[in-house]
Image (spheres, rainbow, N blue to C red):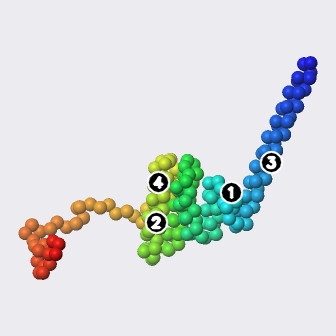
Amino acid sequence: MRMRSLSSLIAAGIAVSIAVAGWEGYRLSSARDFNRLVDSGVDAAATQGSPEAEFARALSLAAHNDYDGAVRAYKELSRNTDGALLQAVLYNLGNLHLREALQFGPESIGKSLPLAELSKTSYRELLRLNPQHWDAKYNLERALRLAPEREASDEEAPPLPQNSERAVTTMKAFTLGLP
């Protein structure tokens, strides 16, 4: 009797092990299929609705130099995720903006400055979530070197002379009130 219960217990353990191995095999097969889709450039996120699949899609778009598509994908992810995935999204979004700003360089300041500002915003948001993210700190420093911030202070403006007229008061036929 004791031998039967021991053998049935062993058989149940083997059955559970086979079921777990089958499930893990299925997950491995799904991951391989998904990776194959990502490598081929197919919209892999359309086949799986997970945030990780969307993240892989955004990475693929960035790797294929589709700046606008990657930004849209990262922005969508930043609204719908949290935790470590959100940190990765913010870091990659900042990197994407910074890389694009560095392509224009200082001679095209009109194009590179807004991108550098966007990268600084992404890095700062990430550092609010995780102040110990050293890569974001380093890249924020690089973005600050590209587009330094001006400190607004009242001391920079020269003081007005004490008995000077203001331009508005000397203009003729001009009122500040409503008609």
39 vs 9, left or right, is: left
What residue is rendered at 32% in x and 61% in y?
Answer: 151
- Give me the disc on residue 146: none
Q: Earlier in the sequence, mark 1 or mark 2?
A: 1
The answer to which quarter of the image holds residue 3 is top right
- Give me the disc on residue 25: 3
Out of 83 and 1, give the one closest to the viewer. Answer: 1
**In the rendered image, the vertical position of residue 106 relative to residue 86, given as above or below:** below
What residue is rendered at 49% in x and 48% in y?
Answer: 129
Q: Amino acid at mark 2?
A: Ala
Q: Amino acid at mark 1?
A: Gln
* Label 3 SS: helix
Q: Residue furthest top?
A: 1
Task: Name the image quarter holding the N terminus.
Answer: top right
Q: Earlier in the sequence, mark 1 or mark 4?
A: 1
* Label 4 SS: helix
- Residue identifier under label 4: 125
166 vs 150, left or right, is: left
- Give me the disc on residue 116: 2
